[in-house]
Image (cartoon, rainbow, N blue to C red):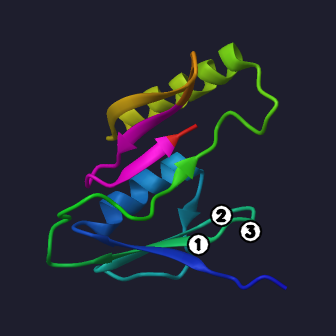
Amino acid sequence: MATHWTLGGDAEDPHRLAAFWAAALGYIAEPGYDDPDGASLIDPDGRGPAVGFLRVPEPKTSKNRLHIDLRVAGEPPWDMPARETLIRAKVAELRAAGATELRDEFYGDHLGHVVMLDPEGNEFCVA
């Protein structure tokens, strides 16, 4: 049996960061979790891991060694033009929610993924 686990992250403003990631992932705030210095998100369908954020005093200083990849285009085999449309739509949605677009990465001639920053500068990819 697999071990249940939570992805934890440090944050300047855990509630703001949790609100962004709840929208990005389709998650909800964990019922009953009420901490001014922390926030916890859960998958409303109970399939994915919980995601938690704790307030820390120090700022982010370097590239993430671990990050979230949002897989909005499904699994291969892909219809590459349709895949790019799905990725671009999610990127636009995330920009509107406070993310910053950094760069496009290509697999040959086709869009592979888009590298973005969340509202606190943490890198993630949309594929």
Identify the residue position indicated by label 3 in the image.
Answer: 46
Element assignment for label 1: strand
85, 12: nearer the viewer: 85
Q: Are marks 3 and 2 in contact (CB under 8 Å)?
A: yes
Q: Position of residue 46 (x, y in %)?
A: 74, 68
Residue 38, x across and y down, in percent: 35, 78
- Look at the picture and state if 69 lies above or below 3: above
User: Compared to 24, does 49 lie above or below?
Assistant: below
Q: Which residues are magenta?
A: 113-125
Q: Is residue 5 magenta?
A: no
Q: Position of residue 94 (x, y in %)?
A: 43, 37
Q: Residue at x 53, y 82 (%)?
A: 32
| Tag 1–tag 2 contact (CB < 8 Å) | yes
Q: Marks 3 and 1, Cα distance to the nearest angstrom? A: 9 Å
Q: Residue at x 50, y 48 (%)?
A: 23
| Residue wearing tag 1 | 50
Task: Indicate the amino acid at tag 1.
Answer: Ala
Circle 2 residue: 43
Circles 3 and 1: CB distance less than 8 Å?
Answer: no
Q: Is residue 120 magenta?
A: yes
User: What residue appears at the point 62 percent right and 25 percent down from the top-left corner?
Assistant: 86
* Mark 3 burial class by Cα count in 10 Å: few <14, some 14-19, many 20+: few
Q: Tell me the chief SS of the magenta region.
A: strand
Residue type pointed to by label 3: Gly
Quarter location, residue 35: bottom left
Q: Give the distance between the C-alpha atoms of the residues marked 3 and 2, in whole angstroms.
A: 5 Å
Give the structural element (helix, strand or loop) at label 3. loop
Query: Residue flagged by tag 2: what amino acid is it?
Result: Asp
